[in-house]
Amino acid sequence: MGNTVKTALLLGALTGLLMLIGGLIGGRGGVYIAFIFALILNFGSYWFSDKIVLKMYKAQEVSETAAPDLYNIVRNLALKAALPMPRIYIIPEETANAFATGRNKEHAVVAVTEGIMRILNKEELEGVIAHELSHIKNGDMLISSIAATIAGAIGMLATMAQWAAIFGGGRSDDDDHGGIIGLIAMAIFAPLAATVIQMAISRSREYMADASGARITKNPYGLAAALEKLTKASQIIPMNANPSTAHLFIVNPLTGKSLMNLFSTHPPLEERIARLRSMKPY
């Protein structure tokens, strides 16, 4: 199944779950209120995401004069990808990682750590930058925001369901909606299911960025080699990252912290590397 189709189906599943829990509580009103509230919160996050995350990691914008090699790599690959030149930031971290952010193609940012620039050669760094530019080209920031909005609304409705169950709200026990038992079950399992679906969307977009990044450089092996190095580097020097931003990075900065794959924002690195190595150079 193509990653675009898979993303659409997963977003549809999130929407269906939202409608289900809303109907169980007793009507459309709660769904609309929760969705609008979540939309406002996540719209603010989406609009200011670049400023928030860059400040969080103390990233500094660099000019062509300050980082000519990195600047040239980004500029050349942005031209190949038919993208406006993004702003470039360097994160003062020895751990090796990178991410892209920004609300759209015209306000995009590519950020790399000092560590990743030290351990990767030019071909490998090009693979990483192309991957991040692919996130920008594929509109992954917007898709992540949509998924977060729906998942956030589900979480709010689950809280409403808990209170409804406590105070005897919802449908009666003998109707088709399951009444109090249904409310309790939905309050427990709906947020869990929403999180699993949201993480699956993130993993699907990572696979897509790997593939489209390889098409930009016409060399899947550069990114594969980079991911191999990053796998080891992230274990040697882990990053003190905020879990809410983990999905942004090219490799999960929380690697080694006993997160289950089901709840991981990234696919297994071994699988990503295998897929890239199975591709033929363009």
Image (spheres, helix red, strand yellow):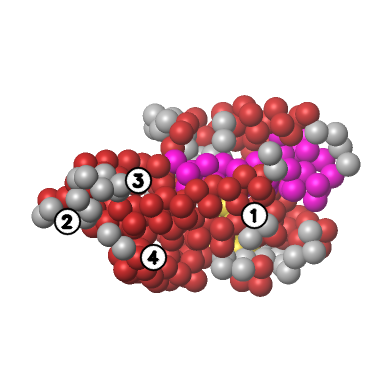
* Residue 199 vs residue 277, the one in the foreground: 199
- Amino acid at circle 2: Gly
On the picture, is 149 further left or further right than 104? Answer: left
- Amino acid at circle 4: Phe
Q: Position of residue 282 (x, y in %)?
A: 88, 41
Location of mark 4 (residue): 35
The segment highlighted magenta reads 196-225
- Amino acid at circle 1: His
Which label's residue is closer to the chain start, 2 or 3?
A: 2
Q: Residue furthest right?
A: 282
Which label's residue is closer to the chain start, 4 or 3?
A: 4
Q: Position of residue 266 (x, y in %)?
A: 54, 39
**Label 1 residue SS:** helix
Which label's residue is closer to the chain start, 2 or 1?
A: 1
Q: Quadrant of residue 38?
A: bottom left
- Amino acid at circle 3: Ala
Q: Are marks 2 and 1 in contact (CB under 8 Å)?
A: no
Observer-side mark, 2 or 3, equals 2
Observer-side mark, 1 or 4, equals 4
Q: CA distance from mark 2 to mark 4?
A: 20 Å
Give the tally of numbered discs: 4
Q: CA distance from mark 2 to mark 3?
A: 18 Å
What secondary structure characterizes most of the magenta part?
helix
Which label's residue is closer to the chain start, 2 or 4?
A: 4
Location of mark 3 (residue): 190
